[in-house]
Image: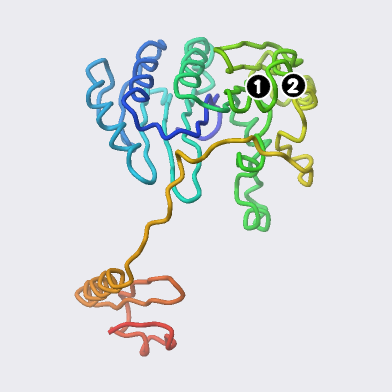
Amino acid sequence: MAHDDCIVLGGHSARLWASGQDSGIAISELLRCGVSWDRWGTCEPYEWAFSDAAAGRFHEVWREQFSQIGFGSVAVQVEPTEMLAMFHGFCGPRPHPSRFAVRCPEEEWKPHAAGLLGLTHSLFVGLQCFHGDVHHDEEFDNQHRVDMNDVEAILQHGAIIGVGYKESLPGVYWGNLFGPPVTQWIGEDRLRTCPCHEHRELAPGYHLIIAYPDVFAHDTPEAMSAKDAIREHLGVERFFDRRFPHRQTTPPPLDWSELYRPPPTIDPAEAAAELEKLKEKARQMGGWLETRKGQIRLHLEGTSGPEANGEGPESSSD
């Protein structure tokens, strides 16, 4: 799918979506939202047909993916329009929120908007998300993407800025979803009285704020003014705003313990034995293995040792 010309709907959760209940919510909402999902799987190209009959295998793959320590993902796709719904999670010593995202091409938004918004609301509540949004790709790019020609900025901050929940909420968009931890942090009354185009209470503790009428009008003065009014009302310190890069921000109080996994313990003897196996494989391939400053590099060209290749004493091989 092309990166641009899409509407993206999504939500973030501090939970690891590993239960059968989570997969049940995902597949039941996908089946009843009115979109004809075609294929599904864990990586492109998606290999299984998506239908009611997919439920058993879907639950099995879902739990297999999300119960593992590390990265898990399940996606469904509609062809030929390439509408995509993806669920993924990453847990570890530096946990990231579990996330679902639905990408809808511009030309498919009008006929599918109601169903996709309903799907987003159901998943947001059912999967216990703390924050989410609905935005046009260009709106996200304007607020978060670094100019790819600015090499210095990319090296310093990365290609995407302002999306880390450990610093603040990412920003204000056309659609803004707030779950219980963030709702309590901001305040129910403040959300209910927020100046906006539309406010909906999806369930106790779950709110949707639509900033301005048209999702495609994100770069108009009216849209910018509406988003500024929301920031001012809810607290500018709670949101990243690239116009004010040095503004002090406050992160939402989120519990990451379910996604935290301690670093694996490594037995030095086992690590040394594995390294010897890798060296032997390198020799069998006609090369040699360089180990330097915590890095391992396979050399397949030149001679079979580091000295003749101009490597210093820090390298090692047999």
Please state the horizontal and vertical placement of residue 46, each as a whole percent of the image. Answer: 30, 32
Q: Quadrant of residue 183?
A: top right
Vertical arrangement, residue 56 with respect to residue 147, above or below: above
Q: Quadrant of residue 226?
A: top right
SS for callout 1 = loop
Identify the residue at image location x=43%, y=52%: 262
Left/right of residue 32 with respect to residue 111 in the rendered view: left
Q: Secondary structure at mark 2?
A: helix
Residue 166, compared with residue 227, is above or below; it is below
Inspect the image, locate mark 2, and give the three-letter code of the amino acid beneath it.
Answer: Ala
Residue pictured at 38% horizontal, 57% vertical: 264
Residue shown at 37% from the left, 71% from the top: 297
Q: Residues within 10 Å of mark 2 (few under 14, many from 20)?
A: many
Of pointers 1 and 2, the one earlier in the residue sequence: 1
Residue 174 tag number: 1
Q: Label 2 belongs to which residue?
A: 223
Tell whether label 2 touches label 1 (CB within 8 Å). Answer: yes
- Quarter of the image with the N terminus is top left
Judge from the rendering whether residue 232 lies leftward or rightward of residue 145; answer left or right.
right
Frontmost residue, 155 versus 318? 318
